[in-house]
Amino acid sequence: MAELKNGASGPAFSLLDQDGTKVQLSEYAGKKLLLYFYPKADTPGCTTQACSIRDAMPDLSDSGITAVGISPDKPAALKKFKDKYDLNFTLLSDPDHKIAEAYGTWGKKSMYGKEYEGIIRSSFLLDEQGKVIRAWYKVSPKDTVPLAREALAG
């Protein structure tokens, strides 16, 4: 897994959102983007992370930041997750995990002694040109927003 470094260009993507609409990274040009990868919609950690971003969106928006979450879930599961928690940002479906691989967020994990491949929870703050301001790999669900705010402040 090759991790993205600060200053690298965020790999382009074209993925379906929770409504089945194609969304591309280029649509966010001119805006800062908090892009985060999470393992599975409506699981405890992913819900904590999504709800913290939802609650912070007014402040993030005031700072010119848009948020987008990416997971391997299908659009229907993303729609259900978004509606259930009234999420105020876009969720994208990466079922073949090609974009996760491009961002270095797909790799070996282990649970209960069993190894498997999956999403490594990670967040990226991209600038208006799509370059990485900061990248956080193996981020805690509760730390996504505080880390983004810290990066903006300093």
Image: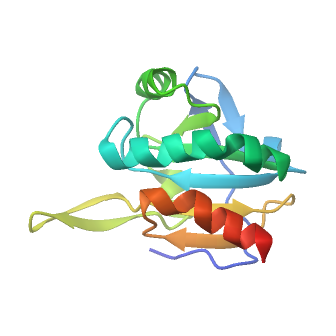
Does 107 sit left or right of 61 as displayed? left
Does 93 sit left or right of 41 as displayed? right
> Is residue 96 among what the camera can see?
no
Question: In the image, residue 134 lies at what x, y percent?
Answer: 67, 72
Q: Residue furthest left?
A: 113
Question: In the image, residue 79 lies at what x, y percent?
Answer: 49, 22
* Quadrant of the image occupied by residue 80: top left
* Quadrant of the image occupied by residue 131: bottom right
Q: Residue at x 41, y 41 (%)?
A: 47
Q: Residue at x 86, y 58 (%)?
A: 128
Vertical position of residue 122 compared to residue 78: above or below:
below
Does 96 sit left or right of 27 as displayed? left
Image quadrant occupied by the C terminus: bottom right
Residue sitting nearer the eye, 43 or 131: 43
Image quadrant occupied by the N terminus: bottom left
> Is residue 16 among what the camera can see?
yes
Vertical position of residue 85 compared to residue 39: above or below:
above
Q: Residue at x 69, y 42 (%)?
A: 57
